[in-house]
Image (cartoon, rainbow, N blue to C red):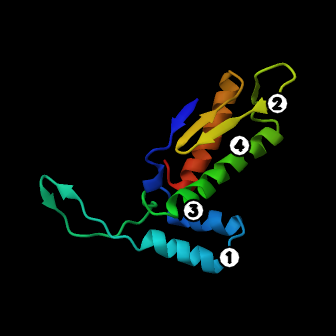
Amino acid sequence: MKIDLEKAFGRLKWSFLREVLSGAGFGNKFIELSMRCVSSASLNVLWNGNTTKFFQPSRGIRQGDSISPFLFIVCMDRLSHIICDEVAAKSWKPISITKDGPTISHLMFADDLLLFREASEEQASIMMTVLDKFCCASGES
C-alpha cells in the first residue's frame, strides 16, 4: 500500500511533536527551541481576492523552515517503530522478495510511505489498526 503524506506537515499535533522529541532523548532546551519555531508562526489567507487577518495555527509544521524536514522525519520514525514492534510481536507479517531473503514491512521516502504485508483480511485489519493508532496520536486523522 502506498500512502502520500504530502499534507502531513500541516496536521501534526504539537503535543505529539513534543512527546516524540522527548521520547527520542532530545534535551529540554532543544525541544523548547523547536516548539517555539513551529508555534511562533502567524498566517493569513487569500480568500476571494481579499487577505484575512493574521491568525495563529494550533498544529502543524511549516514547509520551508529549515528544521521542519528533520522534525517530520523524527515524527515518522515513531510510526516506523510502531510497525517494527508489530513485526517483532509477529502480528504484522512482512513480505519477502525471495524465499530466504530479508523481509520488508515498510519503506519511507520523503513524504511517501510504502507498506508491505501478507495479503489477507487479518493483515489488512492489523495495518489499519496501526495506522489509526498513529493518526490519532499525531493528528493525521
The residue that mark 2 highlights is 102
Q: Residue furthest left?
A: 49
Residue 23: % across, % down: 70, 65
Q: Is residue 107 left or right of residue 91?
A: left
Q: Mark 2 falls on what kind of element?
A: loop
Other-residue count near label 1 (Cα within 10 Å), few / some / many at <14 / 14–19 / ≥20: few
Q: Nearer the viewer, residue 118 or 4?
A: 4
Q: Residue 16: which disc? A: 3
Residue 109: % across, % down: 58, 41
The residue that mark 4 highlights is 83
Tell me the residue at 45%/60% (across/down): 60
Q: Give the quadrant of residue 126.
A: top right
Q: Earlier in the sequence, mark 1 or mark 3?
A: 3
Q: Amino acid at mark 3?
A: Phe
Q: Nearer the viewer, residue 39 or 118?
A: 39
**From mark 1 to mark 3, how far is it between C-alphas?**
16 Å
Task: Give the number of the mark in front: 2 or 4.
Answer: 2
Task: Give the number of the mark in front: 1 or 3.
Answer: 1
The residue that mark 1 highlights is 27
Residue 123: % across, % down: 69, 29
**From mark 4 to mark 1, how far is it between C-alphas?**
26 Å
| Depicted 57 relative to depicted 140: above or below | below
Task: Give the number of the mark in front: 2 or 3.
Answer: 2
Tell me the residue at 66%/23% (across/down): 121
Q: Earlier in the sequence, mark 2 or mark 4?
A: 4
Verify CB contact (< 8 Å) between mark 4 and mark 3. no
